[in-house]
Every structure is written in C-alpha cells, then in structure tokens.
Image (cartoon, helix red, strand yellow):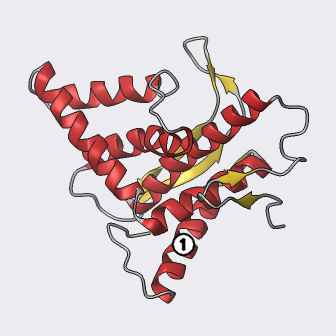
C-alpha cells in the first residue's frame, strides 16, 4: 500500500489527515521531525553498510526513565567491512540530528542529546583532549551533512520518513529498499551519486 501523503515543493513530507488524526499542529511537527530524525539514522546506517533491524517513531521508555520518541535499531554485523567503525558509528548518531534540521531549519540538540552524549563518549575513546574531540565532532558533523545532502540519500530519507509517518515502524529491509530505489532513480536519470554503497 502506497503512503497517502505527498512531498511538497521543498522536498519535505506532507502527511495525510489519517496519519495525523487527533494530533495538534505542534504534535504533527514533532512527529514529522522525529520521522526525519530516525530516517537520517537509518539511511546513514544503510549507506555505511550497517544492518538495520527496524526503525520506529513509536514513543517508548528509556532506561534512564525518560521517553524516547523513536529508535533506529541496528542489527549485529555489517553488510560490508568498514575502514573506521568508530567514525561510522559517529556518523550514524549525528545523521538523525542533521536530517531533522533539514526539516526544522535548525539543530535540535535537546532532542538529540542522547545521540550527542554517545558521540562525545565515542570521540573521547579515540583519545585526545576536549578541544580535539570538539574539532573531530565538528568534522564528523560536516561529513554527515555532506553525505545526507547527496540528492539520492536525501530522497531516501524522505521516503523512509513518509513510510514511518504512515506505519510508525518499518523493517531494515524496507530502509534498504528505499535507499536502493533512490540510488537507482538517480542513476537512471543520469545524475551522479556519491558516497554510497547501499
């Protein structure tokens, strides 16, 4: 069944009435932002060769007692080897905030606070002082922005976000399908894609 919502002229998802029935406009905005956030994690994981179990925007509890609005659950193993597994992990963590910012127009560090804490922890493992870790995080954020700005990757994020809004949860197989579909469309149109291996 095809999603019942459209992509507007800016390339952003416009949900149908059934998908957002009973929600206020701020709740709708939060739902869409969460869908983009989780889609960003998922698409980055796919292009970096990570296996994805599922992606959801269903609210749930986290161990610290708070509430999470969504999750991209990675499966163990990889579809391909990585030259730098730590860098891949950081890029996947930052991709949620980057994709969400393309929808909202700004970084929501509060919404990505758990991701950012994990990024800081990973970068401190790499060694160096606080200033070096901050510089490395900025470089990784720039790289995540660059990768998600590839038209085929952004198209895949939009398709995944649309599906999440309608279904609330999708499989890793669906994510890979949307990434492959987006890359194929770009190739058929004769437009180059870069930085992908879905």
Q: Is residue 150 left or right of residue 102?
A: left
Asked which quadrant contains residue 22, the reply is: top right
The answer to whether residue 194 is above or below residue 149 is below
Residue 17 location (% of width, % of height):
88, 47
Q: What percent of the width, then of the height, locates residue 81?
A: 29, 62
Q: Secondary structure at mark 1?
A: helix
Position of 120 relative to 141 (above/below): above
Q: Residue tagged by mark 1?
A: 182
Task: Say whether residue 15 is left or right of residue 188.
Answer: right
Tell me the residue at 60%/20% (across/down). Answer: 62
Q: Is residue 189 visible?
A: yes
Quadrant containing the N terminus in the rendered view: bottom right
The residue lying at 50 percent from left, 88 percent from top is 188
- In the rendered image of this protein, does residue 20 appear above or below residue 15? above
Left or right position of 4 against 52: right
Tell me which residue sits at (24%, 36%) in the image: 138
The spot of residue 196 in percent (x, y) is: 37, 68
Q: Residue furthest top?
A: 65
Pick the quarter of the image with the C terminus: bottom left
Q: Position of residue 161 (x, y in %)?
A: 64, 52
């Amino acid at each position: 069944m095809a999603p019942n919502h459209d992509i507007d002229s800016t390339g952003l998802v416009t949900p149908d009435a059934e998908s957002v029935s009973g929600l206020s406009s701020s709740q709708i905005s939060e739902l869409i932002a969460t869908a983009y956030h989780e889609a960003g994690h998922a698409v980055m994981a796919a292009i970096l060769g990570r296996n994805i179990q599922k992606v959801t925007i269903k609210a749930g509890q986290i161990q610290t007692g708070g509430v999470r609005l969504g999750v991209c659950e990675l499966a163990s193993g990889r579809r391909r080897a990585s030259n730098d597994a730590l860098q891949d992990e950081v890029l996947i963590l930052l991709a949620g905030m980057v994709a969400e910012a393309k929808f909202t127009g700004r970084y929501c560090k509060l919404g990505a606070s758990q991701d950012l804490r994990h990024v800081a922890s990973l970068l401190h493992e790499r060694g160096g002082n606080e200033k070096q870790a901050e510089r490395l995080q900025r470089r990784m954020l720039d790289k995540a922005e660059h990768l998600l700005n590839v038209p085929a990757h952004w198209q895949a994020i939009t398709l995944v976000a649309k599906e999440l809004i309608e279904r609330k949860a999708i499989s890793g197989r669906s994510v890979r399908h949307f990434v492959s579909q987006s890359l194929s469309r770009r190739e058929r149109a004769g437009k180059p894609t870069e930085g992908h291996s879905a």
